[in-house]
Amino acid sequence: MGKKIKKEPLTKAEKVYRGLGIGLFAYTVGCAGAGAALFPKMTENESKTLAIAMSSIFFGYFVYCAVQMFLAFFYYKKTEEFAGIGHGVMLSITTIINIVNLKFFLVMLFEGLGKTDTAKRIIGSSVSETEYLQTLSGTWTALLFGMVAVMILGILCTVKLVKRIGDN
């Protein structure tokens, strides 16, 4: 009879990281779906309520990515599994992308709140709102790639967690 190699039990750090990674995946899918559904309506109707809703959804995504980034590095520190570093680096890049997009969502929030002067100060006096919106294609593309990366990490978290639970 062969010997059975006993796997290390799931650590609390891994459970937390992977569980919240699955949650971030779901939130990212919802965020992307909300963006696809709400942005056309928001721009068509110039809806202040939708502008506030979209910016709030983004701020939640931004915070969730940043927290998950720290959890990935904490997961590595506790388990010494290099996946934590890889995930942490990808989430760091995504957080930086979110910081770049933060300006737009702040402008959107202040416009939604009726604080147009504050929104114009954020944009800058030398640029019109139309010119500002035209310069965003690169940051939007980066945001899309960041969301795809987060979704891939969420899928990896799901697969690894299911596999680890099955092994124990």
Image (tube, helix red, strand yellow):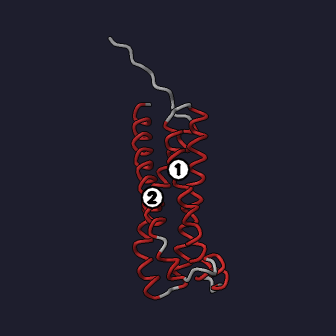
Q: Residue at x 60, y 52 (%)?
A: 67
On-image quarter of the N terminus? top left
- Taking depth in this image into account, of 4 and 89 the one nearest to the observer is 89
Q: Is residue 58 above or below residue 6?
A: below
> Type of residue at label 2?
Met
**In this picture, residue 162 sits left or right of residue 14:** left
Asked if marks 2 and 1 touch (Cβ < 8 Å), the reply is: no
Q: Position of residue 34 (x, y in %)?
A: 44, 71
**In this picture, residue 87 sits left or right of residue 114:** left
Residue found farthest to the bottom? 45
Q: Position of residue 90 (x, y in %)?
A: 50, 48
Residue found farthest to the top? 1
Q: Position of residue 161 (x, y in %)?
A: 44, 40
Which of pointers 2 and 1 lies earlier in the amino acid sequence? 1
**Disc 2 secondary structure class:** helix
**In this picture, residue 137 sits left or right of residue 63:** left
Circle number at residue 147: 2
- Distance in Å between CA atoms under marks 2 and 1: 10 Å
Residue found farthest to the front? 126
Packing grade of label 2 (10 A; few <14, some 14-19, many >=20) is many
Packing grade of label 1 (10 A; few <14, some 14-19, many >=20) is many
Circle number at residue 91: 1
Q: Is residue 133 above or below residue 85?
A: below
